[in-house]
Image (cartoon, helix red, strand yellow):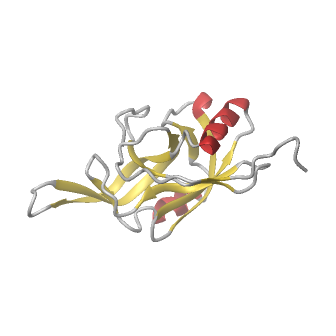
Amino acid sequence: GLTMKSNPESEQLVCGVEYKFVDENKSIVEGYASVFDNEDLNREVVEHGAFKKTIQERINRGVVPFLDSHQWNIAHTLGSIIGAAEDSKGLQYRAQLSNAPSVQDARIKMLEGHIRLNSIGHRVVRDHFVRNAETKAVRRHLDEAMVLEISALPVAANDQADIVRVKSVMPFEDLP
C-alpha cells in the first residue's frame, strides 16, 4: 500500500476498483476492496479466503467504515460498508454513502473517474513468506487479514490497479 498511515496499528493494501452506483437515490457503491493473487509494490499477495472471518465478524456487524484515503476521522468518512463477499477475483464490497455535501463531492469524483482505486486498512492475523528460487525475492502472503476500513483513493502503489469502470445514470434536468 501507500506510505500514508493515519493509524499506525494498521497496514494498507491498495488495489484497483470498479465503482458501480447501483441506485442513484441511495448512493450505494460496489467495488473490489482487494484482489487475490496480485502482488503489490510492497511484495504482498492476498490469498483466497483471507477475508472470510472478517466478513463474518466485522463487515456483517456493520463496523467497517468507507473512508477517503485512510483518514480515520469524521471529515473523511464517506459512509459504511454494508456488505462484502469473496469471489474468485477478490473481496467485493457494497458501501452506503452518506448524504453529507462533502461526500457528494467525492461521489462525483468517483463518477467522473478521478477516484479509481480502493485500499484496505487491515491487521495481519496470519501470513507466510515465500522466496522465489530464481530471483531470491521474498513475498509476504496474507492468509488472514482483519479489515478495519476500506478507502477510496486517487493514487495507488499497486501496478495492476489500472482498470476502472463507473456505471451510473446521471440525471439531467432537461431529459424526461
Residue at (40, 33) in percent of width and height: 5
* Place of residue 70 in the rendered image (x, y in percent of width and height, measured from the top left): 48, 37
Can residue 58 be spotted in the picture?
A: no
Horizontal arrangement in the rendering, residue 54 relative to residue 38 (left or right): right
* Place of residue 156 in the rendered image (x, y in percent of width and height, measured from the top left): 40, 42
Residue at (73, 31) in percent of width and height: 101
Tally of marks: 0
Residue at (73, 33) in percent of width and height: 100
Q: Is residue 37 above or below residue 176?
A: below
In the image shown, does 149 or 88 lie closer to the viewer?
88
Q: Quadrant of the N terminus?
A: top left
Residue lying farthest right? 176
Q: Is residue 11 above or below residue 21?
A: above
* Place of residue 86 in the rendered image (x, y in percent of width and height, measured from the top left): 50, 67
In the image shown, does 3 or 38 lie closer to the viewer?
38
In the image shown, does 90 or 6 lie closer to the viewer?
90
Q: In which quarter of the image is residue 79?
A: top right
Can residue 28 be spotted in the picture?
A: yes
In the image shown, does 147 or 48 lie closer to the viewer?
48
* Place of residue 15 in the rendered image (x, y in percent of width and height, measured from the top left): 42, 51
